[in-house]
């Protein structure tokens, strides 16, 4: 009787874990599909916009955004962090660039349209920086953990007499001769 209860608990636990994995996979697929579509639309605007500075920022935003999506596959626990980026930042960028393209194509020369275009150019620089920060944030804890691992390893090398305090390799043959 006890073994049946234990079996049932283990089986139910495995089912719950599988459901969680399936939900994470589904959420990942939704996020990446949504983001990929938005990135593609932004990239299409790069070819339509004539301003080289804006084109450059668009290219970098798209490149960094794709790196974020690639990183998300490796780090699915970052989905919550990336969700705001996908739901807000990318669509907002697309909306602003679409409006910029319309103003640029009409060759509007009013003071308001000129200020709008300049403001979009500045804003795109900030979006590019935000994308880079988003990507960096995805790796911050990994970098901290790896730095700690390196410190431990260096301490082991010193303790074992393989390097000196400046991390220079100690020539064991000369000392042992």
Image (cartoon, rainbow, N blue to C red):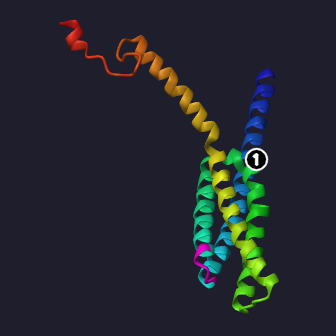
For the N terminus, the quadrant is: top right
Residue at horizontal 78 percent and vertical 27 percent from the top: 4
Residue 64, percent from left and from top: 60, 60
Which picture quadrant has residue 127?
A: bottom right
Q: Identify the residue under disc 1.
A: 19
Indicate the position of residue 70 as horizontal and vertical percent values: 59, 56
Give the answer, above or below, for where 151 lies relative to 95: above
Which residues lie in the magenta part? Answer: 49-53
Residue under the point 78% across and 37% down: 12
Residue at coordinates 54% horizontally, 32% vertically from top-left?
146
Q: Is residue 51 highlighted in magenta?
A: yes
Quadrant showing the C terminus: top left
Q: Does dot 1 land on a helix, a strand or a loop?
A: helix
Query: Label 1 crowding class (10 Å Cα cut-off): few <14, some 14-19, many 20+?
Result: few
Q: Position of residue 172 (x, y in %)?
A: 25, 13
Task: Identify the residue at the far bottom of this view.
Answer: 106
Q: Nearer the viewer, residue 130 or 13?
A: 130
Name the residue at the front extreme. Answer: 111
Does residue 157 appear in the picture of this structure? yes
How many marks are shown on the rendered structure?
Answer: 1
């Amino acid at each position: 009787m006890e073994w049946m209860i234990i079996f049932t608990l283990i089986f139910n636990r495995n089912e719950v874990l599988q459901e969680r994995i399936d939900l994470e996979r589904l959420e990942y697929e939704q996020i990446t599909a949504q983001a990929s579509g938005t990135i593609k639309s932004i990239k299409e605007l790069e070819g339509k916009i004539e301003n080289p500075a804006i084109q450059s920022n668009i290219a970098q935003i798209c490149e960094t955004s794709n790196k974020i999506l690639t990183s998300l596959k490796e780090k699915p626990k970052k989905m919550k962090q990336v969700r705001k980026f996908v739901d807000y930042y990318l669509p907002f960028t697309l909306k602003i660039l679409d409006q910029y393209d319309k103003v640029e194509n009409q060759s509007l020369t009013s003071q308001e349209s000129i200020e709008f275009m300049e403001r979009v150019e500045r804003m795109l620089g900030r979006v590019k920086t935000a994308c880079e920060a988003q990507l960096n944030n995805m790796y911050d804890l990994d970098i901290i953990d790896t730095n700690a691992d390196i410190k431990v390893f260096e301490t082991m090398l010193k303790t074992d007499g393989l390097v000196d305090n400046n991390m220079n390799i100690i020539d064991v043959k000369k000392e042992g001769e």
